[in-house]
Amino acid sequence: MSRLRRLADQIAGLWRIKVVRRLLVVIALVLAYQLWLSVQTIGKVDDGVGLHPDADGRFAVDVRLGFAPERFHILQLQQHGRVSGSDRETVHLRGVSEAGVDALAHFYWIKEIAPGVGRTP
């Protein structure tokens, strides 16, 4: 019991230090944000995405944003595939890998990721 009591006293002593307390709050906020990013990806990727990959295991996807894409969004999407055009709120990407789809799903500003309709990888 005395070991547990000593450990509890040491933790309580650390919590009294302002820098440690602030650091722990920042760590908790970052972890909460990462958890939120992971939770909000659920249901964002259509079941048909990646069903027909090319020889390299890549495929075409349509990324719906919910707003007209700006330069920033196009540049971010280009890191995960080749942009082959856009229609209003949808950007068409080719050559996207499974890891690229996972990375895209973590962007909070992407509403939906669907298979690239009528587009070849």
Image (spheres, helix red, strand yellow):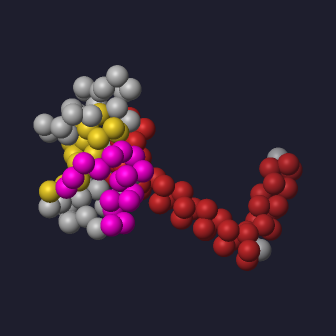
Image-based side of 9 in relation to 61, left or right: right
Q: Where is residue 93? Give x, y as percent.
A: 28, 46
Q: Residue at x 35, y 39 (%)?
A: 96
**Quadrant assignment, res 29:** bottom right
Whether 27 is drawn above or below 85: the answer is below
Farthest residue toward the bottom?
A: 18
Looking at the picture, tell me which residue is in the foreground, 67 or 10.
67
Q: Where is residue 86? Give x, y as percent.
A: 19, 55
**Quadrant assignment, res 74:** bottom left
74 part of magenta stretch: yes
Looking at the picture, tell me which residue is in the foreground, 20 or 52.
52
Farthest residue toward the top?
A: 55
Quadrant holding the C terminus: top left
Whether 23 is drawn above or below 79: the answer is below
The boundaries of the magenta stretch are 71-86
Whether 75 is drawn above or below 92: the answer is below
Q: Where is residue 24? Give x, y as percent.
A: 65, 65
58 part of magenta stretch: no
Image-based side of 101 in relation to 23, left or right: left
Looking at the picture, tell me which residue is in the foreground, 52 or 4.
52
